[in-house]
Amino acid sequence: MATNNTCQKCGCEDQALTTPIVCPNPAPCPDPQPCSEAFDSQCVYYTGADIICDGDIVVYQDDTIERALNNIVDYFCANIPTPPAPIKGVLPVQIIPNPDPTILTSTVSSGTAPFTYNWSFAQNVLRGHTFATSTTLSTIKFDLTTDGIRTIAGEGLYQSLVKLEVTDANGDYGSAYYSFSTSVLL
């Protein structure tokens, strides 16, 4: 570094250094002495080669020390990667049918209560098949009526797919599917 008294209105006085160089070049400095003078950072210039990081010039030759320090801080603060979102755990969720085919119960074998449940039909919803209870409970009941589907004589088998999503108090998530068949009078 060298001083350059060409900056204007930076608080520098036009005078030479009053203390000798601490360690003459090229001899190493065995016992460095602390500086006895201080200089305004706007008056001291960096005279080395441009400082480059990942192809970007962070400090240019002839930058003031103040600008150089600000550039370094700005560069590294702007390039701090955003920390990744915490990885949420996967909850082991099962759907268990009851002897009554219109009732399904969920079990979660780990996680932190309270749990949030969300039941839905994922595929093949037959008209008249609805949830008879709230879809936010651990056990669900269906209404499996076949409202107005009697157009052709006979009986058919209809399959629906139910999806359950469970989230615990920590945001851990799990899901399960259950396929059930219904005999439909056609």
Image: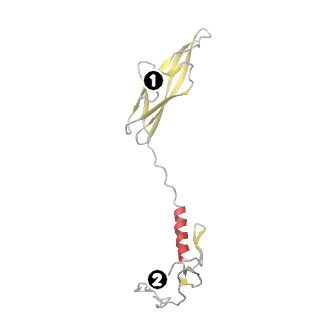
Residue 133, horizontal then vertical, whole percent: 45, 23
Q: Secondary structure at mark 2?
A: loop
The answer for how far apart the CA atoms under marks 2 and 1 are is 78 Å
Tags 2 and 1 in contact by the CB under 8 Å rule?
Answer: no
Residue 7, horizontal then vertical, whole percent: 58, 81
Count the numbered circles shown.
2
Q: Depth check: 163 or 14 in front?
A: 14
For label 1, count other residues whose C-alpha is less than 10 Å away and answer few (under 14), some (14-19) or many (20+).
Answer: few
Residue 67 shows which numbered tag?
A: none
Residue visible at 53% across and 20% down in the picture: 129
Amino acid type, residue under disc 1 in the picture = Thr
Q: Depth check: 107 or 63 in front?
A: 63
Vertical order, 2 against 146 (above or below): below
* Residue carrying label 2: 38
Colour mapping used in the image: secondary structure
Q: Depth check: 113 or 44 in front?
A: 44
Amino acid type, residue under disc 2 in the picture = Ala
Residue 175, horizontal then vertical, whole percent: 47, 34
Residue 116, horizontal then vertical, whole percent: 43, 34
Q: Which residue is most to the front?
A: 9
Vertical order, 135 against 58 (above or below): above
For label 2, count other residues whose C-alpha is less than 10 Å away and answer few (under 14), some (14-19) or many (20+).
Answer: few
* Residue carrying label 1: 133
Whichever of callouts 2 and 1 sits on the residue coming sooner in the sequence is 2
Residue visible at 53% across and 75% down in the picture: 66
Q: Secondary structure at mark 1?
A: loop
Q: Which residue is most to the right?
A: 152
Nearest-to-viewer mark from 2 and 1: 2
Q: Depth check: 19 or 13 in front?
A: 13
Residue visible at 58% across and 76% down in the picture: 63
Residue visible at 40% across and 40% down in the picture: 169
Q: Is residue 150 left or right of residue 99?
A: right
